[in-house]
Image (tube, helix red, strand yellow):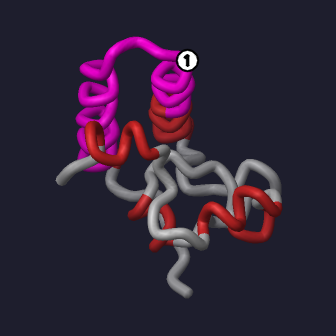
Amino acid sequence: MQVARAPEGTALRLRILDRQAKVNAVRPSQARDALLAEIEAALRRIDEGIYGLCETCHDPIEADRLEADPLLRLCLDHLSARDLEATSRTSCWPPAFRQTCFRR
């Protein structure tokens, strides 16, 4: 398994900011607000130089997982059983946001 290293800040920041703009375009909801908070937290982690590190063990988060979801905070070893089950499915984004916010 390939391990993530902190990517170049500018490209990642632009990618996350693009997602933030798409989320902002969706009508207000509690889920939207929670996702915006996760985006802000990811941007903060980039600024602090700890992006891509597990919040529990501080080991690098798996690179393929970060590529699929740049908002991840935990490595596979520290996911709850529920989150681990959700990770095994094809998408880690809530259905309301998959179609609206994260098209490439």
Residue 29 placement, left or right of 18: right
**Residue farthest toward the front in the current orientation of the protein:** 95
Highlighted magenta segment, given as a residue range: 10-38
Q: Mark 1 — residue? A: 30
Secondary structure mainly formed by the magenta segment:
helix
Observer-nearest residue: 98 or 4? 98
Asked if residue 85 is positioned above or below residue 28 in the image, the reply reads below
Q: Does the magenta stretch include residue 32?
A: yes
Residue at 29%, 32% (x, y): give it.
Answer: 17
How dense is the environment of label 1, judged by Cα within 10 Å: few (below 14), some, or many (20 and up)? few
Residue at 46%, 61% (x, y): give it.
Answer: 91
Residue at 25%, 25% (x, y): give it.
Answer: 21
Classify the position of the N terminus by image quarter. Answer: bottom right
Judged from the image, the secondary structure of the residue bearing numbered disc 1 is helix
Observer-nearest residue: 2 or 49? 2
Identity, as a three-letter code, of the amino acid under mark 1: Gln
Q: Is residue 45 magenta?
A: no
**Residue farthest toward the bottom in the current orientation of the protein:** 1
Query: Where in the figure is residue 93, as x and y percent of width and height?
Result: 47, 49
Asked if residue 27 is positioned above or below residue 46 in the image, the reply reads above
**Residue farthest toward the left in the current orientation of the protein:** 104
Query: Where in the figure is residue 99, as x and y percent of width and height?
Result: 28, 45
Query: Where in the figure is residue 8, as x and y percent of width and height?
Result: 33, 54
Observer-nearest residue: 86 or 73? 86
Query: Where in the figure is residue 35, as x and y percent of width and height?
Result: 50, 30
Residue 40 placement, left or right of 88: left
Counting labels gives 1
Asked if residue 71 is positioned above or below residue 57 in the image, the reply reads above
Residue 84 placement, left or right of 43: right
Residue at 40%, 38% (x, y): give it.
Answer: 96
